[in-house]
Image (tube, coloured by chain):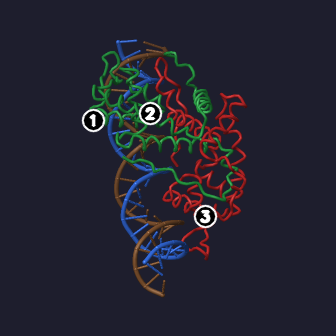
Chain colours: A green, B red, C blue, D brown
Amino acid sequence: MNQPGGIDKPEEGISKESLRGSLGFLLRVAQLRSFSHFFTVLADENIRPGEATVLDLVRENPGIRQGAVSKTLKIKRAQMSKMVREMEASGLISRRVPPEDRRSVELRLTPEGAARIAQITTHFPEVEKRTVKRLTPGEARELRRLLIKMAGFEESKGE
Amino acid sequence: MNQPGGIDKPEEGISKESLRGSLGFLLRVAQLRSFSHFFTVLADENIRPGEATVLDLVRENPGIRQGAVSKTLKIKRAQMSKMVREMEASGLISRRVPPEDRRSVELRLTPEGAARIAQITTHFPEVEKRTVKRLTPGEARELRRLLIKMAGFEESKGE
DNA sequence: CGTTATTTGTTTCCTAGTAGACAAAATTAA
DNA sequence: TTAATTTTGTCTACTAGGAAACAAATAACG
């Protein structure tokens, strides 16, 4: 398990104009912050953000196909294949090949997986809170809204 | 050179409530979008976002120490060491050990490096434009402001 | 029907990036 | 000054993740 490190103190006396102009860089730093808080808060749970997201999505969509998870979470199929097999091996999810399309694999949580993700998600509000610590509640809401719009996740009515 | 792939079409009929609530996930997706556009627009330049950011920061701060670049850009020292040596080998930057602190290394652009980053940065506005395509100009500005605040990059007056 | 094209998941190989140990230099403490 | 601590960059080993090739199944097309 390779957790990225904590947050370094910023350096003084460095001109950062170009950085402030780069949305890509700002997004990367924000994401590092977010993941850092994730690992801090969920240190005892021994899980990574990607795995938690997969479990949560499977919980929300029982029987979802592996490829659909892959596309939704922007995780490459190769990587998803590894992750899913690991999580099956550790008893968190079940894989089922449906007879109507024997190429695909349906994913479901095992009771252990359901308990696991339920426990894990209890920590999410704390992670979110720390991540947006420097923003006002209104700013945090707005940031979320803008990211959702940017990612094209707007329509969520079962879509 | 391992460029991450393009943008997949989203999947239909999947419930994504939990995803929309996860700032970390939204940041990740936004960053993937941003990097994807970077690789599309700068396909012919054969450079990665991290390298471009390093060159840009060194351009803005000639003689900056390697560790300062590392901390500012949140790139681990080990990785920075590799990158810097590569860029030195390809003639983009020069490394100099100052006599007053012989542990450290000062970085400067070579004329080739300066020309390179100048050429590269001409593409940045197009990358930014594509990244925030779905946002209004005002929303894009606000997103940038919020990310800067979140990252603690607010004070930039030479700081 | 049979043939070709596409989709789905897997496997193999490779690159980017991290952790941890290290050496050298500089700083602090005794 | 000497000794202990910290800082700085590098090196080695390991992990996460991507690209490309692949096999099996399905869909599209003649």
Query: Which amino acid, mark 2?
Result: Phe
Residue of label 3: B65
Q: Earlier in the sequence, mark 1 or mark 2?
A: 1
Q: Position of residue A142 (x, y in %)?
A: 62, 29
Determine contact: label 3, label 2, CB under 8 Å: no
Q: Are marks 1 and 3 on the same chain?
A: no
Q: Distance of mark 1 from mark 3, alpha carbons?
A: 45 Å
Q: Nearer the viewer, residue A59 or B129?
A: A59
Residue of label 2: A124
Q: Nearer the viewer, residue D3 or B39?
A: D3
Q: Are marks 1 and 2 on the same chain?
A: yes
Asked whether, in this view, residue A107 is left or right of residue B26, the answer is: left
Asked whether, in this view, residue B35 is left or right of residue B159, the answer is: left
Residue of label 1: A90
Label 1 sits on a secondary structure element that is loop
Residue at 45% x, 35% y: name it.
A76
Query: Which amino acid, mark 1?
Result: Ser
Label 3 sits on a secondary structure element that is strand
Q: For marks 1 and 2, give the one nearer the viewer.
A: 2
Q: Position of residue B109 (x, y in %)?
A: 67, 62
